[in-house]
Image (spheres, coloured by chain):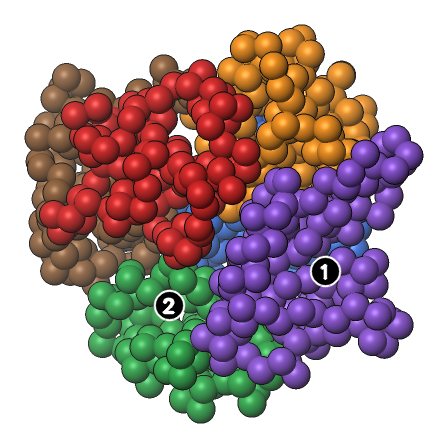
Chain colours: A orange, B blue, C brown, D purple, E green, F red
Amino acid sequence: MGTLTLGCFSSLVGSKSLDFTLKLAKAAADKGHKVNLWLSGNATVVGKNHQKHLKDYSTGEKPVLELLEKGVEICECEACALARGIQKPDAIPGVQWNAMHWYLAKIYSSDRVLHIGGE
Amino acid sequence: MGTLTLGCFSSLVGSKSLDFTLKLAKAAADKGHKVNLWLSGNATVVGKNHQKHLKDYSTGEKPVLELLEKGVEICECEACALARGIQKPDAIPGVQWNAMHWYLAKIYSSDRVLHIGGE
Amino acid sequence: MADIKCAFVIQRPPYKSETSTLGFTHAISYQVVEMLLEDGQNVIPTVCMVGEGVLNLIKDQKAMENYGVTSIESHGKNSLLVDLDILVCKEDLDGFGIPEDRLLDAEDMGADKKLQIVPYSEIQKAMESANHLLFF
Amino acid sequence: MADIKCAFVIQRPPYKSETSTLGFTHAISYQVVEMLLEDGQNVIPTVCMVGEGVLNLIKDQKAMENYGVTSIESHGKNSLLVDLDILVCKEDLDGFGIPEDRLLDAEDMGADKKLQIVPYSEIQKAMESANHLLFF
Amino acid sequence: MKLGVFVNDYKSTVDTVERLKADKLGLIFVQNGVYHATLKVNGKPCPLLDKTANLYALAEDLATRGLTDADVDKRVKVVTYSDVVDLIFNDYEQLAWL
Amino acid sequence: MKLGVFVNDYKSTVDTVERLKADKLGLIFVQNGVYHATLKVNGKPCPLLDKTANLYALAEDLATRGLTDADVDKRVKVVTYSDVVDLIFNDYEQLAWL
């Protein structure tokens, strides 16, 4: 079993890159791999609580809670979240808030890194 | 003097399309034109209160308040906001919430329409 | 007062950004715009599919099954159901090798409207006759 | 334990999305990563600018004046100041006709490092010798 | 039609702009669209500049990218936001963002 | 290097992929990248398919777009998320998202 670190910058709604990231994280965790997930840029919206799941829109809250239960470590960029008006009390419990070096530190001990950059 | 209706889907941070929209709205209002602004998709984040203005990031709250003061009508797509975890109490006071027909109704009586679509 | 005509030009592929979905949903909302207008006033969108935008119309999209979201196909079908004109660029379909029988229709929903596959010159005309253009 | 090398490949133009800024800021954070690692462990990014990514390096960017945000130039300068290697693809600069004297440096901040303009083959080598690739 | 097109990106928009026709066509280069007005690729200016005589580039977006008036192709007029508002109301009836 | 490239978009990624070299190169078509594996443009399959023999397309992203296995170029293997995890750990050491 290996360690996979995923980074994602893509926004929650519209782009399916964040959906891809969450699904890949789940598939890897289900196979017994250790998974770390770094959310930066527009992706930080996925860590917000109270997302209303309307049929026209992707939602992140449910899959994020599932991943946390499977032991996936999830951290979002604090500055990116604050800049979008998301504050600590809005965060999904269990999602870490930290700066970018968290991501690099996870990369250090990873077998594989998939960085899903900008749009 | 004419009426300009602007629609924007672009996200607040990163893309400068929303900055462009807000600046153009201001320039038109400053010249005495009537301006309407419709925010949909990722642009709805601009209508959220408590945006922290960090130097690395665009911010929408201040220019939105300025536009409201100049009499610009601003409305955001309710469904798009809810899907992003933004709820009514999070809205900047004075920003309307409505559905897409608000935009079409404003278009009806506009001399010019500039629709700034997806990324 | 006369109708105001708008050309909604959808030019981007599906599911990469939200824009094609929003193109259809904004067009469909013409149905209720009268709530905010005076008697006799109306806004009439014509939807034009060009470039990679034609890829939005391929039928049997399994977006709900795979991503839990309404497919763009459904939005296209709903657009036909509310009697919107949807013009599809023939040259772009041909370029991608997409035959007409791969495209959505809304017969199962009882829609009378069908997609209208037309040369680009017809789409140009629709844009010229519109009061406003909205590119998605 | 050995250093882990990462190639940060910045390939998109500035100010259209956040991605080039985030590329630089993520690279710069290598400076403090030791806080979260054991003694002797480190992560060393090499920043590679290719394609439209080279446009991020043009100097005298007035982003703060016009948009109230830190310029990407500043992030590039800060990257030099913290001794990151920034490799710039010569073929892409030449293709766009951008001479070296139009590019940023961080001499005014006292940086020793300069941009390293290299053929694409050198960037390929940097990618090959990296443990991980991150495309921005 | 009198069509003002806001060209806001560099690579992806050329195809659509190429096939637009209008009695009066204006191209307003904003955001990364300003590279069309400034960069020569392998020595050649952008073919979009041959499409019409009505070419504009937004000053703020040039400056933000470290570009100066000297970089701008001579056929393109550098404009402010205020100028853009006047173009919108006085010169073009339909507008497109591409 | 053993490089797995996730090609996630249709138009914009070809240039960068074209010049990547690797001892072992895999192209994994996801999201709108799956059009590279399925569409012929003016009758010609995408040139990226000539770049390596290791070609994969994500089943869910094909189905989401109304595409079937019959649409996929014969050189491309249709894979699940679970297969992608195995490709990542067993076949490629470095990964890129383009």
Which residue is pictured at 62% across the width and 80% down the height? D100
Q: Is A15 displayed left or right of A60 in the figure? A: left
Quadrant in the rendering for residue D102? bottom right
Q: Secondary structure at mark 1?
A: strand
| Quarter occupied by residue C64 | top left
Q: Residue at x 26, y 68 (%)?
A: E18
Residue pointed to by mark 2: E5
Closer to us: mark 1 or mark 2? Answer: 1
Q: Is residue C122 above or below residue F46?
A: below
Say the numbered circle drawn on residue D61: none
Residue at horizontal 64%, vertical 9%? A70
Q: Is residue A103 left or right of residue B105?
A: right
Q: Residue at x 26, y 49 (%)?
A: F47
Q: Is residue E16 above or below residue F20?
A: below
Q: Check disc 2 and give the amino acid type.
A: Val
Q: Which of D128/B81 is in front?
A: D128
- Asked if badge 1 and badge 2 are on a common chain, one would say no
Marked residue chain, label 1: D
| Chain ID of residue with mark 2 | E
Relative image position of residue B15 (x, y in whole percent): 57, 53
